Image (spheres, grey):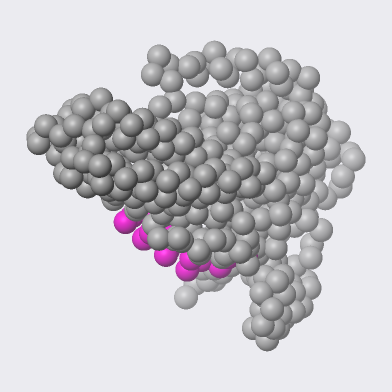
Amino acid sequence: MSPALESIFLVVGGLGLFLFGMKMMSTGLELIAGDRLQGIIKSVTSNRFSAVAVGILATIAINSSTATTIMTVSFVNSGMMNLTQAIGIIMGANVGTTFSAQLIAFRLDQIAPLFIFIGIIMYLFFKKRSIKNIGYAILGFGVLFFGVTVMGGPLKGLANNPSFNAILTTFQNPILSLLAGFIFTAIIQSSSATMGILVTLHLSGVPIPFITSAYIILGTNIGTSITTVIASIPANRDSKRAALFHIMFDIIGSALFGTLIYFIPSILTWFRTTWTEPARQVAMFHTLYNFATMFLLLPFVSYVAMLMKKIVPVTSEGDEIVYEKKLMYLDEKIIQSPSIAVVNAHMELSRMGRIANENLALALDAFAENDLEKAKRVIKNEKIIDYLSHNIAIKLIWINSMTLSTYEASRIGRMFQTVSDMERIGDHAENIAEYAIYVDGNDLKFSEVATGELKELSEMTGKLMIKALDAFEREDTTKLSEIRDLENQIDKLSAKFTDNHIERLKIATCEPKSGVIFTDMIIDLERSADHANNIAHSLLLEGKKSLH
């Protein structure tokens, strides 16, 4: 094998180790801090400075601006965060993602084997999940820097290769440099990885002009926003606005600073005089450029939010649920990590819950109004609910096979029961629609008292459904006692109305066939309320076992 080919193989192998180590470290950090950070992100106030601070800290903690922004878009979609808050967090995430490049520039590759040894010991020989997760992150950290070591030697050799240098000269064109950063980052979906590779090239002495690296960095920032845009496609309009802001923020910053550098290249002189090492110059440009872009737009956050609303206006249809027979949030192409998978599973379940709730309300209308068209729509929608139930369960099994934190594993475990509860609500809605068809076909009549009782119980069940599913979607445990009390009232009313029905049968004021439908309706409503209560209480750490 020729020395040049051997060098290329070592560089490719080192790059693979680097990317794998970066992924391991990010996954490990998410396992350690991901569930806590979700709580911190959700609790952020409308204060733009606190939102930015949370975005910076969250991204440093899990080493992924993509994960932070996708979580943020998910929270906006579920109503737990408004657009202004999301914009602040996204700004902070762009700054936080520069931390990993700064770390790589410290030349820690010489002690990488020590990190690998410590990480393996913690991961393999400790049973406690929290220690194993820390070990996994340390192991990833070591593998990342070992990849830098593997690449370093061959890259130093290639730095003196005329053919290799000829390839580098093609990237002296600013547009090509920017496109290279954009495309590579969009493909690997990690600006941290792209920046790490760029810093490693400089550490190895590869003669990349600083101005070329600057344009690559500008392209990298735009590329990292592509995943967020893809993740927002099935989400609501505020989520699309947050994703649009992310890519516009990066494009505006890149266009502004790219133009300044092109016409006034001496701007980069300050970096060369302040830091002597090329790797540190690149890392500092990445950090300070993102800080400058953030400070430039920070005073205008509220105006930017208004602009996003004008660009993505409210449609005449609003943000109604689309009854499509497909998963909208659990596409494996946009799921980058276990934490994002868990958040998206919650969003998919929330969507299924809203469809089940609306179908139950439609079934009750069909029964009360003797509307056969509505009854047929309920039966049609039930097929969508069954499809979602089956396919969400399959995805939950897939997510459960990932490396999850203790909290995330518990949460996914409870989601299996929640899917079942939602599917059963859909079944009860279908039952009620079939009663409506049967009543119409057999010309059955109900007494005025029976009609009033069914109406009262239907309204209470509908009220409980809305409260329970809203609590689940927003992950709001403050209303659980209110939901439980309402469910207890429905149980008591169900028993009372059943007793009343028996008394009416005794005095022959109710037809037997109508009476059967009446009692079946009571059972379906009462059990729907039970399932709704189960869904709300699944938010508790210990969960709540199904009542039926």
Q: In which quarter of the image is residue 430?
A: top left
| Quarter of the image with the C terminus in it | bottom left
Q: In the visual, does 212 lie left or right of 451?
A: right
Q: Between residue 139 and residue 113, name the one nearer to us.
A: 139
Looking at the image, the residue that sits furthest to the front is: 507
Tell me which segment is drawn in magenta: 390-405
Measured along the vertical axis of the image, is residue 493 above or below residue 246?
Answer: below
Looking at the image, the residue that sits furthest to the bottom is: 125
Measured along the vertical axis of the image, is residue 492 above or below residue 445?
Answer: below
- The residue shown at (57%, 64%) is 410
- The residue shown at (86%, 47%) is 276
Please name the predominant secondary structure of the magenta segment in the image: helix
Residue 135 placement (x, y as % from top left): 70, 74
Residue 17 placement (x, y as % from top left): 58, 67
Q: Between residue 433 and residue 234, name the one nearer to us.
A: 433
> How many tags in the picture?
0
Q: Between residue 32 and residue 45, name the one nearer to us.
A: 45
Residue 12 placement (x, y as % from top left): 53, 64
Q: In the visual, does 380 lie left or right of 522?
A: left
Q: In which quarter of the image is residue 185?
A: top right
Residue 19 placement (x, y as % from top left): 58, 60
Q: Is 392 one of the magenta-colored residues?
A: yes
Residue 414 appearing in the image: yes
- The residue shown at (44%, 25%) is 319
Residue 177 appearing in the image: no
